[in-house]
Amino acid sequence: MSANNVQALSSAADLIRRDGENISPSYTRSYPFVMARGRGSEVWDVEGRRFLDFTTGIAVTGTGHSHPAVVAAIKAQADKFLHMSGTDFYYPTQIELAERLNRLAPISAPTKVFFGNSGAEAVEAAMKLARWYTKRPRFLAFYGAFHGRTLGALSLTASKEIQRRGFAPLLPSVSHTIYPNSYRNPWPGQDPAQGALDAIEKHLFKTTVPPSEVAAIIVEPIQGEGGYIVPPDGFLAGLRQLCDRHGILLVFDEVQSGMGRTGKMFASEHWGVEPDIICLAKGIASGMPLGAIIARSEVMSWPPGAHASTFGGNPVSCAAALATLDLLEGGLVDMAAASGAIMVSRLREMAEKYPQIGDVRGKGLMVGVELVRDRASKEPDAVLRNAVVDQAFAQGLLLLGCGANSLRLVPALNIERPLLDEGLMIFERSLAAALEAQA
């Protein structure tokens, strides 16, 4: 028997043991799922067990696992050539993808694209570009934000202390402020959007952060790792006005919320607010590594050599992204909006039955469920959240947490209705089982 066949027959437990002996312990695995193959919204582990995937690889495989059109595009490009660095040479897929992204960008001015490999790289590029264009040193980000783990992006990240512990000093001149949360409003009696804006304009800008030194405010239009927090209406528009008053660039990190995830191509379109720079990755290429920033052409004015990436905009990844955009524009964005409405409605029906569901929020198929001890106190219940994740895995549903005590439900944008219904049924069953075990 060949070595490959022996490896294929290895049990999940054996593979997990080998992983522990050979791979960095810094990864975060919630449960022992070892994937063998996937198709659409269904995945199978190495021992043949079937699961429904409501994680999509952290909101990456938006077109489902191994969509035939994406696979065909990858194969066709791989037959031509795998790599020719786009920083030094030209090739069609990179140019065509940039044209598509510029056409789709929710920015009325002309735009240009820079390609990298990941969300963190996109954020790093946005930070460098903002400093280049404004000649200012400072950045403003938000508590609860996740922008990546490279040192510049990590300086903006403020979702979990473990992500920052031991890595100081980080990038200087980065300040954080409160992201508005309608469910947990830190300004009782005041509109949370206005409270968040006042905290910037009337506090930070008058005490520790001179606005004339701020290059950019970097914000997730829907906060991801921080708990799938949907901002109150008026917040993003208020940020746009604040930035315009002070000559600050507005950067939208749409790494997790973009590419149709929220029922629109970009989450910011729900509020009609235009950024100066957009950061993209995750769902852009259905699982192939690719990141990008789209910026107003006036802003993307840096000269040759100022920033580049050897593998950024890889031709195979660009081919996958073009096929992904065909699918998104061909109906998957609208499908996400419709399926998301069904999901939120069903979850809110569950909330009437289970007072431990404190809040259901989201847009499209970017849905968060916050679990609490009881609805009156809103006391976060991370133990219950973790128990639901474990119960769901045991019953054949893959879930991930977010924030301190919330669950994220991010199935493929093209999930079929029977599978959506099955997943929600397993979710409710898992919640009930977790509650019973706690009793």
Image (cartoon, rainbow, N blue to C red):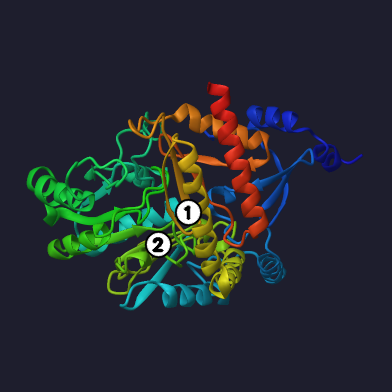
Image quarter for residue 280? bottom left
Is the residue under label 1 in contact with that under label 2 (CB below 8 Å)? Answer: yes
- Judging depth in this view, the residue of 238 and 73 nearest the camera is 238
Identified by mark 2, the residue type is Ala
Q: Name the residue beneath numbered marker 2.
A: 267
Identified by mark 1, the residue type is Met
- Can you name the residue that lies furthest to the front here? 353
Image quarter for residue 145? top left
How many numbered marks does the figure carry?
Answer: 2
- Judging depth in this view, the residue of 236 and 83 nearest the camera is 236
Residue 131 pos. (x, y %): 25, 58
Residue 37 pos. (x, y %): 73, 49
Residue 277 pos. (x, y %): 33, 64
Say if residue 248 shows up in the picture.
no
Q: Please state if 403 lies on the left or on the right of 208 as rendered.
A: right
Say if residue 337 shows up in the picture.
yes
Q: Find the distance from the CA under tag 2 to the CA under tag 1.
A: 10 Å
What's the residue at 57%, 59% (across, down)? 62
What's the residue at 57%, 42% (across, down)? 399
- Judging depth in this view, the residue of 327 and 395 nearest the camera is 395
- Disc ID at residue 366: 1
Task: Describe the element under mark 1 as helix, strand or loop.
Answer: strand
- Can you name the residue that lies furthest to the right here? 1
Q: Quadrant of the N terminus?
A: top right
Above or below: residue 215 compared with residue 152:
below
Task: Describe the element under mark 2 as helix, strand or loop.
Answer: helix
Residue 401 pos. (x, y %): 49, 39
N-terminal-most mark, 2 or 1: 2
- Disc ID at residue 180: none
Above or below: residue 47 compared with residue 83:
above
